[in-house]
C-alpha cells in the first residue's frame, strides 16, 4: 500500500469511528435520562411536536442545514456528511431500542450516570475524529464554522459552538413544551454540559487526540512524496 492509499484508509477509518462515536453519544444521552445533546434536544422537541420519528426528522433537519453549508462552507461537505446525516439518528434509535426493548434494561441511577459520562466523552471525541479526517462533517457541526467565518474569526470555533448549542436547547424546550412532552427527558444536566462544554471539548480532543492519531503532517508529506 503506497503512502497516499494509507493516508486515505486512515482518514476513512477515523471518519467511520467518529460517526460511530456520535451514534453512541446520542443514544447514551437519551438513555441517561439527564437530558440529551443540544442538537438532539432540538430535534426531539420538534419531532414530538409534529408527530414524526426522531430519526426521520433529524434527517430532514440535516438536509435543510446542508443547503446552507453548501453556500457557505462547501469544503465541509463530503462522504462523511452523508453517512452522518443518514446514520446518526437511526443509529441512536437502534441503541435505545436494543437497550430498552431487546435487553429490557431499566437503568438505575449509577447506570444513568455512566450513560451520561459516556455521552459527554463520545460527543467531543466523535466530532473531533471526523473533523480531523476532513472527509465531510455533519451539517450541524458546520454551523459553528459558518459563525466563525461570518464573524471573520472574531468568534472562534469553540465559542461559536456554544452559541449554536444554546440556541438549539432553547428551541427544543419551546417545542417540547408546546407538544406537552416530558421536558426533563430531553433537558437536564447532560444538556447543559453538552451546550456549554462540548465546543471546548471538541477543540481539546482535536489538538491532543485525533490530530496526533492521524499524524496529519507526516502523512501529508508522505502523500506528497508519493505523488511526486
Image (tube, helix red, strand yellow):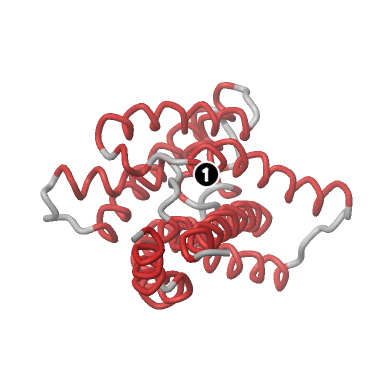
Q: Residue furthest top?
A: 50
Above or below residue 84? Residue 114 is below
Q: Residue 157, image x and y in percent?
A: 26, 57
Above or below residue 81? Residue 33 is below
Q: Which residue is mark 1?
A: 40
Q: Residue 96, image x and y in percent?
A: 73, 49
Residue nearest the observer in this picture, 222 or 40? 222
Residue nearest the observer in this picture, 6 or 157? 6
To which quarter of the image does residue 204 belong?
A: bottom left
Q: Residue 74, image x and y in percent?
A: 31, 37
Residue sitting at x 62%, y 52%: 23
To which quarter of the image does residue 112 belong?
A: bottom right
Residue nearest the observer in this picture, 9 or 91? 9
The local secondary structure at tag 1 comes to: helix
Residue sitting at x 20%, y 59%: 156
Above or below residue 224? Residue 145 is above
Amino acid at each position: 500500500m503506497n503512502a497516499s492509499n494509507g493516508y486515505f484508509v486512515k482518514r476513512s477509518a477515523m471518519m467511520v469511528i467518529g460517526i460511530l462515536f456520535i451514534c453512541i453519544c446520542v443514544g447514551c444521552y437519551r438513555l441517561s435520562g439527564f437530558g440529551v445533546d443540544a442538537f438532539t434536544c432540538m430535534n426531539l422537541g420538534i419531532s414530538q411536536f409534529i408527530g414524526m420519528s426522531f430519526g426521520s426528522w433529524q434527517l430532514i433537519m440535516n438536509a435543510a442545514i446542508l443547503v446552507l453549508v453548501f453556500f457557505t462552507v462547501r469544503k465541509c461537505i463530503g462522504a462523511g456528511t452523508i453517512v452522518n446525516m443518514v446514520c446518526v439518528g437511526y443509529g441512536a434509535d437502534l441503541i435505545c431500542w436494543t437497550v430498552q426493548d431487546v435487553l429490557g434494561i431499566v437503568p438505575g441511577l449509577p447506570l444513568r450516570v455512566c450513560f451520561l459520562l459516556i455521552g459527554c466523552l463520545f460527543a467531543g471525541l466523535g466530532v473531533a475524529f471526523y473533523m480531523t479526517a476532513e472527509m465531510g462533517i455533519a451539517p450541524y457541526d458546520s454551523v459553528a464554522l459558518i459563525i466563525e467565518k461570518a464573524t471573520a474569526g472574531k468568534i472562534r470555533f469553540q465559542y461559536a459552538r456554544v452559541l449554536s448549542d444554546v440556541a438549539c436547547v432553547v428551541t427544543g424546550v419551546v417545542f417540547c413544551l408546546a407538544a406537552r412532552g416530558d421536558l426533563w427527558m430531553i433537558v437536564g444536566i447532560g444538556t447543559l454540559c453538552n451546550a456549554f462544554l462540548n465546543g471546548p471539548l471538541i477543540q481539546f480532543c482535536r489538538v491532543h487526540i485525533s490530530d496526533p492519531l492521524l499524524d496529519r503532517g507526516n502523512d501529508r508529506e508522505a502523500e506528497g512524496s508519493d505523488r511526486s
